[in-house]
Image (cartoon, grey):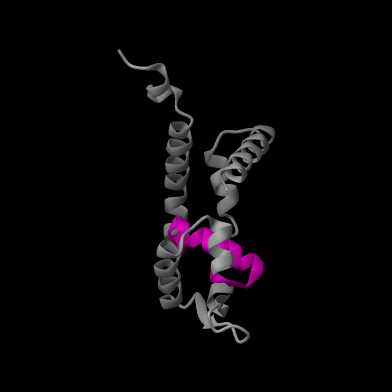
Amino acid sequence: MAVDSLKLENQLCFPLYACSKEVVRKYRPFLDEIGLTYTQYITMLVLWEEESMNVKTLGQKLFLDSGTLTPLLKKLEGEGLVSRVRDKNDERNLVVKLTKKGKNLQDSAKDIPEKIGSCINLSPEDAMTLYQLLYKVLNTLD
């Protein structure tokens, strides 16, 4: 006999995992058009907002460790979307900066949030509630 606490239907982690996987899958065709993976896309979102950022801070913002972030940034650099340079004030710090090509890619991505919104059938109120709850969970995990 299964213990109730070990039933899949009683796990908070499962619907979070399944929703995340399915939402990211919805992004794929739109991101394929601009040549980015989902993780590259969220990295570019931060850089489109900030233009340059210390790698450590970028990793914290995206909840990504250096083992994930380093190859991702190398790939973006290889595509000419970002450059990685040592901080002039502290050589130990690596700074990621948008290139002109990286800035220009933003125009190609500007409609993606609206396209994704039309794929997910939530009212604006439900979407905001979900957003707030997910960040509440994220903030308690730190």
Residue at figure coordinates x 57%, y 79% from the top left: 100
On the image, the x and y values in percent for residue 49 come to 65, 65
Residue at the limit of the structure toward the top, as seen here: 1
On the image, the x and y values in percent for residue 122 come to 60, 33
Residue at figure coordinates x 38%, y 21% from the top left: 7
Residue at figure coordinates x 67%, y 38% from the top left: 128
> Along the line of sight, which residue is nearer the eye, 94 or 25?
94
Q: Quadrant of the N terminus?
A: top left
> Along the line of sight, which residue is nearer the eye, 52 or 89?
89
Q: Is residue 102 within the magenta segment?
A: no
Residue at the limit of the structure toward the bottom, as seen here: 88
Q: Is residue 33 left or right of residue 139?
A: left
> Along the line of sight, which residue is nearer the eye, 28 or 44?
44
The quadrant holding residue 125 is top right
Q: Is residue 110 visible?
A: yes
Residue at the limit of the structure toward the right, as seen here: 125
The correct choice, above or below, for 131 with respect to 92 in the image is above
On the image, the x and y values in percent for residue 77 come to 45, 76
The correct choice, above or below, for 107 with respect to 19 in the image is below
User: Chief secondary structure of the magenta span?
Assistant: helix
Residue at figure coordinates x 43%, y 75% from the top left: 79
Number of disc labels? 0
Residue range corresponding to the magenta coloring: 33-55
Q: Is residue 83 left or right of residue 46?
A: left
Q: Is residue 46 within the magenta segment?
A: yes
Q: Is residue 107 visible?
A: no
The correct choice, above or below, for 84 with respect to 128 in the image is below
On the image, the x and y values in percent for residue 10 come to 45, 23
The correct choice, above or below, for 71 with respect to 18 in the image is below
> Along the line of sight, which residue is nearer the eye, 58 or 51?
58
